[in-house]
Image (spheres, rainbow, N blue to C red):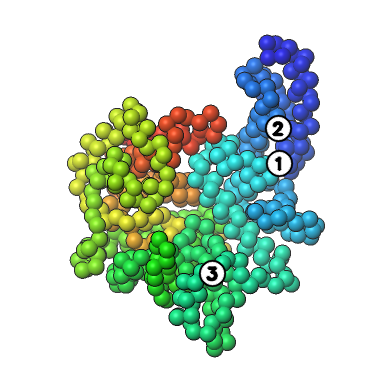
Amino acid sequence: MLAGDRLAAGRLTERHRRTAFALAYRTLGNADDAQDVAQEALVYALQRLPDLRARGRFAAWLRHVTLSLCADYRRRRGTRRLGEPLTAVSEASEENDFAERLAIRDAVAHLPDALRTTLLLHYVGGWSREEVADILAIPLNTVRSRLMAAKRRLRADLGASLLKGKPMPAETFALSENHTSLIQVAFPGASVLSVQPDPEPWQPFTPRVKLALADGTEKTVDFRGDIDPERAALVPVLERLNIPGPPIIHGPVADGNGFLSLCEVPRGENLTLWALGGTPHRIRLATERAFEGIDRLQGATDGLMADPIGAKLPRRTLSDEAAVLTDDARWNADPWLAEEGRARTDWLRDPWFAAALDQVKAAVADIHAPLVYTSYMHFFPQGYRIAPGAGPFDEPLGWPRDPRYGQNPLTEFVYLWGHFGDPLLGLAMVWVYDCYPFVHTGFVEQFLWRRGATRREFAPRLALKALQMVARDLPVTRPTEGGGFWDGLRGWVDQALGWM
C-alpha cells in the first residue's frame, strides 16, 4: 500500500472518515466546519501516507492531523467557540446526571477561548500536555498554566451550581499533627469546617482551612511550606520597605524536611488570574501593576542591604549563576534546579551547549551586578496580589498616570524574597518560563523599552536562563513527538546569542 496502492489508501482513509468528522465536530461544535476540516485532514493524510513509517499508528496520526487542523481553523476564523460538553475535568469520577453535565457545559462555554481550547484538547481530545503544546504551537508551560487557570475557573463557577443544596465535605485533605497544633496555638478551641488542598494554582499556600472559632465566628487561614525562619525574619523588614508580604499568624515550625507556617489568606486577587479573565484594558492595567511591583522590589534593594537581617542574605554574581551549570554542588544546592537535570552532564558534553555557555560566561564576566538570591519566583507577576475593582474595565484606559490606574493597587507580594540587584535576570526567567499571559502581551519588551534597556543588555541574562532551563528540562536528543518545547528553549538560546 505504501508503495503506491492508491485504492487501498483510499479505502483506509474512507474507513476513518467518520472518526475524523466526529472528532472535528466534537472540537468545533459545528457540522459544516467539521465536514470541511475532516475532509482537509483526510486529503492531507492521503497525500502524506507514504511518509508514515508505522502502519498501525494511522488512526492516532489522523487524530493528530485533525486536531491540528481544528486549531488552525479556529485561529483563521476567530469567531467560532468550542461547545463540547465536558463530563469530567479532573480526576473526579464522571457524573452522569444530565443537569450537572449541562452546568459543566455552560461553565466551559464561558471560559476564554485560549483556556477552553486547551482544556478540551487535553481532557476531551485525550492529548497529553506535550501534545497539546505541539498542536497549538505554544510552550508546554503555557499549556500547564492554561489548564490550571481553566480548572480554577470551573471550580469557582461550578461550586455554586453543582454543590447547591449539598453539604460541603468536612475535610478533603489530611491535616497533620503540626497543622492541627498550629491551629490550636493560634486559635484555641477552634474546629475545622473544611479543608481545601489546592486553593489557587501556582501558589505556595496549601491547604486552605476554614475554621469555626470558639467565639462563634468563622475564619479562613492558609498554611505555607516555603517560609523558613530566615524568610520569616525578612517579612517585617520588607514590609517597612513598602513590600507587603504574607501576614504570618504563627510559625514557622519544623515539619519533616521543611517548615510550616500558619498565615492569613492573601490580600487581594492573584494578578495573573485577574488579567486572564479580563478585557485588553484589564490586562493593560495588570501590566502596569506588574511594572510597579518590579520597581518596588528593586527599589528596596539598598534598604534591604542596609538592614542587619538583609545584610546576611547570600550574594552572587551573574558569573556565579553561570557556574551553577557546571558545578554539581551548586546545582544540587538549588532546590528548583535540582528537581530535574537528569541530562545536564550530557548537555555539558554537547558542542552546541558548551559553545553557548562559553559565550555567555564571557559576556557576564563584564557585568558587575551583585545578586541577593533566594527564589526563582521573585519577578513572576502571578505572585503579585491586586485589589479587586468594581468596574468592568470595558473602557479604554488612557494616558500614563490616568487616575484609573490607581484604582487597583498592589496589596501583597506572595513571593517577596528573591534576587535583588538585577531585574533583567528576573525578567529573563519570566520570558523563558513563559509566564502566561504576560509574555504573550509583550510584557518584557515593554519593560525593556520603558527602562531604556537594550536587547544586547538583556541577551546574556536571557541566554543564561534559557541554558539553565535546557539543562534542567530537556533531553539532549530531540523528542520524535512533542518537540516544540525542545525547539523553543534552544531557539531562545540561539536568539539571545545573536543579540549579544
Q: x and y percent of residue 318 in the render?
A: 25, 46
Q: Amino acid at mark 3?
A: Leu
Q: Nearer the viewer, residue 302 or 317?
A: 317
Q: Say whether disc 3 or disc 1 marks the residue closer to the N-terminus.
A: 1
Q: Quadrant of the C terminus?
A: top left
Mark 2 or 3: in front is 3
Mark 3 or 1: in front is 3
The reply to whether discs 3 and 1 touch (Cβ–Cβ < 8 Å) is: no
| Relative to 16, 260 lies left or right | left
Instruction: Please report the residue visible at 49 percent of the width from the left and 84 percent of the height from the top.
Output: 188
Count of numbered circles on the image: 3
Q: Which residue is mark 2?
A: 37
| Relative to 325, 184 lies left or right | right
Q: Say whether disc 2 or disc 3 marks the residue closer to the N-terminus.
A: 2
Q: Which mark is residue 175?
A: 3
Could you give the CA–CA distance between mark 2 and mark 3, rounded to whole angstroms? 50 Å
Q: x and y percent of residue 271 in the render?
A: 47, 60
Q: Which residue is mark 1?
A: 28
Q: Say whether disc 1 or disc 2 marks the residue closer to the N-terminus.
A: 1
